[in-house]
Structure formats: structure tokens, C-alpha cells
Amino acid sequence: MNDHDVLARAAAHAQRYLDQLNERPVHATVTAGELRQRLGGALPAGPSDPAGVIDALVANTEGGLLGSTGGRFFGWVIGGTLPVALAADWLTSTWDQNAASVACSPAEAVIEEICGAWLKELLGLPATASFAFVTGCQMAHTTALAAARHKLLAARGIDVERQGLYGAPPLRLLMSENRHESIVRSARLLGIGTDAITLLPVGGDGALELDPLATALRESDRPTVVCLQAGDLNTGAFDAFGEACALAHASGAWVHVDGAFGLWAATSERHRHHLAGVERADSWATDGHKWLNLPFDNGFVFVADPEAHRAVFTMETSYSAASQGVREQRDWNPEWSRRGRAVACYAAIRALGRDGIGEMVARCCDLAAQLTGGLGALPGVEVLARPRINQGLVRFLDRDGAHDARTDATIAAIQASGIAWFGGTTWRGRRAMRISVCNWRTTADDVRRTLDAVAEIVKRETP
């Protein structure tokens, strides 16, 4: 079989999957044990027919795929890939370019350069900030905190890239008690350590309280990073960026913003007020697979001090080729060899434009409000947090007071129905069902179907 035949076979399977997506169960229907039995076996001793391999791969994964790319997946902040981004991602794999350097692929280097400028404009960030395309928010945080580590320690006379952390003053991280665990992992990866983290309280609106932040900044002269949130994972809360940045900068601290999905509120005229003052931070992280609805392996980091950013990663090699006036990607990126992530990003922004992205964000926020309100109108359902943007929380009440157990049982029943998929979380000591809407595919009909299914489950589960 030639290349064309096997690629056509894969494309046909992909199209069939997408055509059936709206009617497929959202949950996985087979166990890990069944998948191991289907997919496993002895190491192949010899070659197999490529078309047969593709057909078997599709057949043997059936039932083991979560419908997270569909319109009724509300469990985590996971978007569904836009068709134009998927097509561009196919081309990225087909072109098979190493996006580490201009010399490896001039076209992808220029695409990345253009997308970086577009993203800063879309998100309301300084045009002078540097940027990098990384795997996701985890590596975006790590890249930003590495730049912060460089600058804060350089101010103390430490060249951390040359000397390492031995003998350097310990850093500390101040962040919300509602922080995302990916920042904690970044502290581990960078040798900062979790003992360096101080969790600060949030107010009733979920935003970081400023008085405890001011107190914590005064308590120590250790080099400090303040981590703020643009969109808390549970409620979509936003910190007071302008005030927090002023406090932090007055103490010589670096401010990093976790904007995994919340930074995209900048594209919506109705919602960008949540981000007032965010441009005053020192670094920002966000994901492309969330509200821009790109394939996975797309994260973005921006740093206000390009010199600190570049100092972490740039290295001269004897085999480097001249960049010919184009931005050299490897000078800003934690990886060397990597795929051309910016290609899918370029296609999505080119296809939607500023207005299209803003409309998608606003529509998701409206649908999240409809879904949360509709659930709250059902008997025995309590709304814990109405969406500020696209995140809401509800819980299911039990006549005997076992609300946590009832909530978890109802979430499991909804997942088992296959109509929709929600996840559980613990918020302020109570179990809740989280509602996340950031998929371009989600429609008012998806909300209606979900509410009808949950109403039946609530009625059935009520003692």
C-alpha cells in the first residue's frame, strides 16, 4: 500500500469519528483491561500491512476514547479542536519539520513569529514581551518561573544558569490557596521546592486577598514570585491584577499570571474587564487547547523581560546556522526538537479573527450560565457558584444530609448515562460538580439534552 492509500484510510476513519461524535457516548465504555487485551500481545516480529494496522488501531480503541472533543463534555476546561486547526495540525505532521530553529524550517519560524505578535494583541499583553510555544500551561509556568528565577537571582549576584542553585538565596512563591497544581509541579521541576510555597487566603469572590499578600511581602526579603490567577479552575475567579502587581513590584517581587483559560476573556468585550491591570505582570501562561480550541500540545508563555527569558535557554552550538534576521525559536523554548505548534494556532486565528474568537468565548460563557441555571432549577440541586465566565459549581442535596455522597453518586450516574460528562471537585470543604464550557461545538441543544438527562437522573436517584 502506498502513502496515499494509508493516509486516505486514516482520513476516512477520522471523518467517520467526527460525523458520529454528536451521538457517541461521551464516557469511555470499556475497561483498561479490555483495552490491554485488544491492543497488547507480543512484540511484533515482522512488518504488517499499514492499512491493517490503522484499521485495527481504530477498532481496538473503540469504547476507550473519552468524548472530550464533543459538545457535551463539561468535566474539565478542555476545548474541542477546530476543524481548521485539526487540518493544519495534519499538515504539521505531514511536513515533518523540526520547529527548533529557523534553519530547520524557515516557514514555521516565521509563522511562530507572526502568531506570537497576534497572541499578545489578542490577550492584551505588552507588544514588547517575549514568547514561546510550549506543550501546555505546565511548561509555560516552568518557562516563566525559570525567567523569574534568573532575574531575581541575578539581582543577588547569582548566575543561576552557570552556578546552579547551590549557595543561592532560596526563592519563595506566594499564591492563592486555590492555585492550580501545575504551578506546584513547576516549583519542583526548577529546584525551588514546595516548601518555598506560601498559600494565601481568598475572599468570598474567590480572588486573592490583598492585605495578606501585603503582609507576606513584608515578612521576608527573600527573592519572591507572586502567582496570580486569571480564571480560577472552579469558579473562574480573577485576582485584582493592578493592585496586586503594585504591591509586588514595590517589594521587588516578580508577578506571574496563570491564565490557562481566563486570559482569553480579553477577546470578549463583555468579559475583558475581569483582566484590568493584567498587563502589569511580569509573565503570563495560557493554553491553546482550551478556549482557542487547538489540538493538544499547544501552550503559550509570555515574559515582559525578554532578556531574562532568553538568558535561560539560549546556547551557542558549532553547528548552528545563521538565523537570517528571523527569531530563533530555540532561544526561547525549553525543548529543542519539537513539532511546529504555531501552525495550528496560525490557522485558527486566521480563520476566526479577533471577532470570531471573542464570539466563541462569549457564547461559551452564555451557555455555561444557561447550564448552571438550568441545573439549579432542578429539585434537590444547589448552585454553589454561578459562572463569572465559563465555570460553575452545583451540588446535589440528600434528604439525610449526606450531600457529598449524593453529589458524587449523581456525577457517576451522569457519566454512566453517556449523554454528558461532568467531573467532581471539593470546594470550600464540600463536594461539588464542576461545569466547564469552552468547546466551540457546544450548542444550546447540547445544554437542553444535558438538562433533560440530568433531570431524569435526579428524579430516579431521589429516595
Image (tube, rainbow, N blue to C red):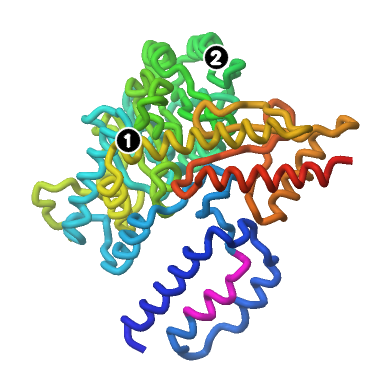
Q: Report if residue 56 lies within the magenta region.
A: yes
Q: Which quadrant: the N terminus?
A: bottom left
The stretch in magenta equals 54-64
Q: Residues within 10 Å of mark 2 (few under 14, many from 20)?
A: some
The number of callouts visible is 2
Residue sitting at x 62%, y 48%:
449
Mark carried by residue 209: 2
Q: Report if residue 87 lies within the magenta region.
A: no
Q: Secondary structure at mark 2?
A: loop
Residue sitting at x 48%, y 85%:
52
When asked about the image quadrant of residue 140, the answer is: top left
**Disc 2/disc 1 C-alpha distance (Å):** 25 Å
Residue sitting at x 29%, y 29%:
125
Q: Main secondary structure of the magenta part?
A: helix
Residue 31 in sight in this render: yes
The amino acid beneath tag 1 is: Phe
Q: Residues within 10 Å of mark 1 (few under 14, many from 20)?
A: many
Which sits earlier in the primary sequence, circle 2 or circle 1?
Answer: 2
Relative to 51, does residue 36 appear above or below in the rendering? above
60 horizontally vs 125: left or right: right
Q: Secondary structure at mark 1?
A: strand
Q: Where residue 366 appears, x then y in whole percent?
A: 50, 33
Relative to 455, does residue 154 appear above or below in the rendering? above
Mark carried by residue 302: 1
Q: Which quadrant: the C terminus?
A: top right
Mark 2–mark 1 CB contact (< 8 Å): no
Closest to the observer, 224 or 367: 367
Residue sitting at x 30%, y 62%:
92
Relative to 241, does residue 358 appear above or below in the rendering? below
304 horizontally vs 109: left or right: right
Q: Where residue 77 appears, x then y in whole percent?
A: 52, 42
